[in-house]
Amino acid sequence: MSLLVVKAAFDREAGVWCVSDSDVPGLATEASSFDLLCMKVEVMVAELLELNGWSDGREVAIEIIAHSTSKIQFAAPC
């Protein structure tokens, strides 16, 4: 079984999850939630792999790694 890694990041400015890096050439998408992004990635990976001749019955695992950065600010001491 092949393992394909897809990295996802949350774009706070745009308010969407997006594919930031991938083992799948041509994979680029975004979604309003992480769950929706995962569903879109599964469909798109299958389509892209089929277009590239991978539709030979092999099983492929997709690992989606999510990353989100937050900032907090402390009040200045009095």
Image (spheres, rainbow, N blue to C red):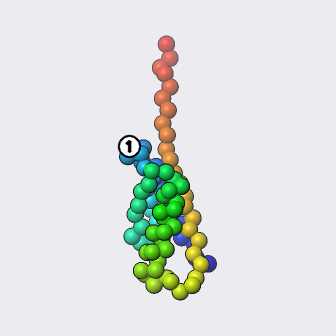
Q: Is residue 2 visible?
A: yes
Residue 55: image x %, image y %? 50, 83
* The residue positioned farthest toward the top in the image shown: 78
Residue 72: image x %, image y %? 50, 32
* The residue positioned farthest toward the right in the image shown: 1
- Which residue occupies the foreground of this view, 18 or 68? 18
- Which residue occupies the foreground of this view, 48 or 78? 48
What count of labels does the image hold?
1
Q: What residue lies at 48% left-to-right and 36% top-to-bottom? A: 71
Residue 35: image x %, image y %? 53, 55
Q: What residue lies at 38% left-to-right and 43% top-to-bottom? A: 13
* The residue positioned farthest toward the bottom in the image shown: 56
Side (left or right) of 63 relative to 49 = right
Residue carrying label 1: 13
Residue 17: image x %, image y %? 45, 52
Which quadrant would residue 47 be assigned to in this image? Answer: bottom left
Q: Does residue 11 sit above or below 54 in this rendering?
A: above
Secondary structure at badge 1 equals loop
Q: What residue lies at 46% left-to-right and 80% top-to-bottom? A: 50
Please state, as top left, top right, bottom left or bottom right, where the N terminus lies in the image.
bottom right
The kind of residue on which mark 1 rests is Glu
Q: What residue lies at 52% left-to-right and 60% top-to-bottom? A: 38
Q: Is residue 20 visible?
A: no
- Which residue occupies the foreground of this view, 56 or 10? 56
